[in-house]
Image (cartoon, rainbow, N blue to C red):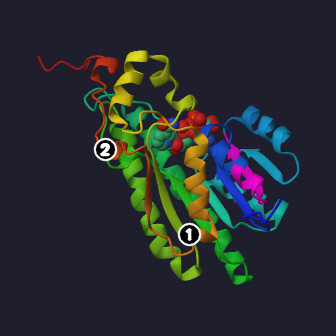
Amino acid sequence: MADPRFAGKVGLVAGGASGIGRAIARGLHANGAQVVAGDLDADGLAALAAELGEGFAWTRSDVTREADAEALVALAATRFGGLDLAFNVAGASRPGYIVDLAEADWDFTVDLCLKGVFLGMKHQARQMMRGGAAGRSGAAIVNIASLNAHVPMHGGSAYVAAKAGVEMLSRNGALEFAPFGIRVNAVLPGLVQTPLTRRHFDNPDAHAAFLERIPLGRAAQPEEIAGPALFLASPDAAYVSGASLLVDGAWAVSGYPDMRPFRGPVAWNAR
Ligand SMILES: NC(=O)c1ccc[n+]([C@@H]2O[C@H](COP(=O)([O-])OP(=O)(O)OC[C@H]3O[C@@H](n4cnc5c(N)ncnc54)[C@H](O)[C@@H]3O)[C@@H](O)[C@H]2O)c1
């Protein structure tokens, strides 16, 4: 491997079994890092371990549980000697119009997408601060938010609020961790072809409605989000912290489609 960007670095991916997280884990590993990944999907992580071999460790881990977030960081320290780069990627949503949305579904989405990132950052930064005190440098955290941090969508209140929270949480981390040399940035993807968005690809009308709003005329592949995320973690971004990088095929400049025809009518009736 000629001049691997992340040689000697230890990277962590929370939500590494599928989609964007898996592409980040592969990218880190291919560029010389030792990698730990956590996810609820143990089978997916085991398959990735079989693919990557040496320099990859995993554990089943729920980002909404603080003990799991701490254990994933501890795995990086015990197996590979520390932590330099962390990616908080796990996410999903239980959508519903505001007037229909159950409290439990709001909690599910916000806990997973927002609290999960807080718990990850808390323990990742603690370990990075220990490493800094011991002479490690170049630590960075990258959080995967969404275009929905800026653009609302029908039925997406919990998700968009959580993703907006991830963007601001990242900026707060950039402020608090800067004295320790730790950078924090957010990536805001547009439409990416992963299991999370399968329903938009399986429905030709919904897919067409999305593509109409995406000036580049197509969805991204997970690797096209992983690349910018890895850039933000790399020495090329040494002076980038507190930034939000839109990776959306110029979608932000054209607005979100009206998804009501695909989501169905509001169930709640005032009369
Ligand atoms: N796909 C898109 O179009 C898109 C767009 C913008 C943002 N995002 C964000 O990108 C991130 C990755 O999504 P993806 O598209 O790769 O989806 P994905 O479904 O392929 O991957 C998400 C991963 O998170 C894991 N996960 C879910 N709940 C978890 C939990 N409690 N603890 C640990 N792991 C958990 C899943 O098992 C899965 O492996 C998410 O935060 C998502 O909101 C995706």
Indicate the quadrant where residue 128 lies.
bottom right
- For residue 174, the mark is none
Q: Amino acid at mark 1?
A: Ala
176 or 248, nearer to the observer: 248
| Quarter of the picture holding the N terminus | bottom right
Give the alpha-carbon distance from disc 2 to disc 1, as whole Å: 26 Å
Q: Amino acid at mark 2?
A: Val
* Stretch in magenta: 27-39
Does the magenta-highlighted stretch encompass residue 178?
Answer: no
Indicate the quadrant where residue 33 lies.
bottom right
| Quarter of the picture holding the C terminus | top left
Q: Secondary structure under badge 2?
A: loop
Is disc 2 in contact with disc 1, using a CB cutoff of under 8 Å?
A: no
In this rendering, would 147 be left or right of 180?
left
- For residue 237, the mark is 1
| Disc 2 Cβ-to-ligand 1 distance below 8 Å | no
Q: Secondary structure under badge 1?
A: helix
Indicate the quadrant where residue 46 lies.
top right
Residue 197 on image: x %, y %: 50, 29
- For residue 151, the mark is 2
